[in-house]
Image: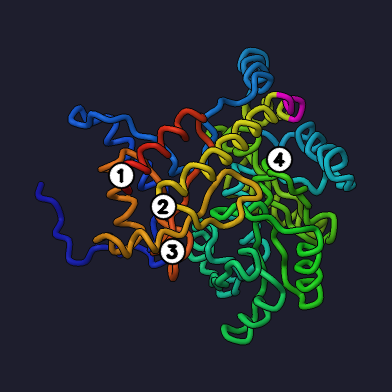
Amino acid sequence: MPAPEISKRPTISKRSGVSPFIAMDVMRDATAMERDPANKRRIIHLEVGQPSTPAPRRVRDAAAHALIHERLGYTDALGLPKLRTRIAQHYRDRHNVDVSAERIVVTSGSSGGFVLAFLACFDVGARVAISEPGYPAYRNILTALGLVPVGIPVGPATRWSMTPDLIDAAERTHGPIAGVLVASPANPTGTMLTPEALAALTASCAARGRWFISDEIYHGISYGMSEATALMSSPDAIVANSFSKYYSMTGWRLGWLVVPDRLVRPLECLAQNLFISPPAIAQEAAVAAFDATDELDTNVAVYAANRDLLLDALPDAGLDNFAPADGAFYLYADVSALLAKGSNADSVAFCHRMLHEAGVAATPGLDFDPLRGGQTVRFSFAGATADMAEAASRLKQWLA
């Protein structure tokens, strides 16, 4: 029987037309090069913000125990009670903030948390302020959900951070802003907000009836500055965190939100329908992560050594203009002087050549800043120290 004639093909939704996550594209290309027998050089990966260390031993032991002894079925949509209780204790222990376990929402990675928070807080068409440069998935998730990201350019004048004045100015230009999303430590810059700056932002949002969402997934990874949680200055703040970065559990896909009481039930209903529950084995194992700080702080000491090595070595390669790397594991470098010397049109072409000619993978700034990112590059120093030294050596030779 002949196939029916197709007179009109169904269309792809406009909401799916988001920009690619360029860091992931670079990782894909770098991995393909590694598998290519014609490639004679090992690739040094500085493109993705992923610790090179495994999950802590306590976490892996807890996962092995769970595989043998636990049923590992669906959990409550809001997460295992024992994990929610342990996360609440974490805020008492680390920040001296009293948070009830009922306000904790365990999520499928912080990415799942952002989807839930955006859906619970904003109606279609609402404007949400984000920093540029900033994590590209913020912009793309907001767009896919029918929301309007309002990029606020930041730079050295404000230590690469948003301020209440910048948000108010953006509102005068773009229209009412329903929410503000900040990260500290930030991706890609690594800069951190002081407690006073964070409090000024939360107070500004409270006075204007805006939701305030604080991305704190890099808490635990800082170099000389103390981390402040938005919960210290606002009980209405929404805090997103993750087991991916400090806890070295990227592939376990587990995060959490801390939310005001009135958001708990809406988030529960959304989570029930969108995700059913976070991964059971990851939740069972994550309870042990909070008792692995000795091992995890050893990882942070490696990041600190990597940071110091690159800040010392990269200027010899012509890379000497960085945002303040207070935390996380990134250097955000201005490469405009290097673009001017060669035929590289922008950071995308620059990173393409760096990968194929020097064997060093890094992420173009256009991933983080659609307007000014053509002149910047992000380097991740979450890998091994030997790899950082090799990358610096290759870049010095390549840029010579």
Give residue 100's position: percent from left, percent from top: 87, 45
Q: Is residue 73 visible?
A: no
Nearer the observer: mark 1 or 3; the answer is: 1
Q: Which mark is residue 318?
A: 2
Between the residue at mark 4 and the residue at mark 3, the CA separation in whole angstroms equals: 27 Å
Q: Which residue is mark 1?
A: 398
Q: Which residues are magenta?
A: 290-294
Q: Which residue is mark 3?
A: 373
For label 4, count other residues whose C-alpha is less than 10 Å away and answer few (under 14), some (14-19) or many (20+). many
| Residue 254 to residue 265: above or below | above
Nearer the observer: mark 4 or 2; the answer is: 2
Question: Pointers 4 and 3 in contact (CB under 8 A)?
Answer: no
Residue sitting farthest toward the bottom: 172
Q: Secondary structure at mark 3?
A: helix
Is residue 293 on the magenta stretch? yes
Tell which circle, 3 or 2, labels the residue nearer the N-terminal end.
2
Between the residue at mark 1 and the residue at mark 3, the CA separation in whole angstroms equals: 22 Å
Between the residue at mark 3 and the residue at mark 2, the CA separation in whole angstroms equals: 18 Å
Residue sitting farthest toward the left: 2
- Report the residue at 27% width, 49% height from top: 353
As shown in the figure, which amino acid type bears the numbered disc 4?
Gly
Between the residue at mark 1 and the residue at mark 4, the CA separation in whole angstroms equals: 34 Å
Give residue 147's position: percent from left, percent from top: 54, 69
Between the residue at mark 4 and the residue at mark 2, the CA separation in whole angstroms equals: 31 Å
Tell which circle, 2 or 1, labels the residue nearer the N-terminal end.
2
Is residue 273 on the magenta stretch? no
Q: Secondary structure at mark 2?
A: loop
Q: Which mark is residue 220?
A: 4
As shown in the figure, which amino acid type bears the numbered disc 1?
Trp
As shown in the figure, which amino acid type bears the numbered disc 2?
Gly
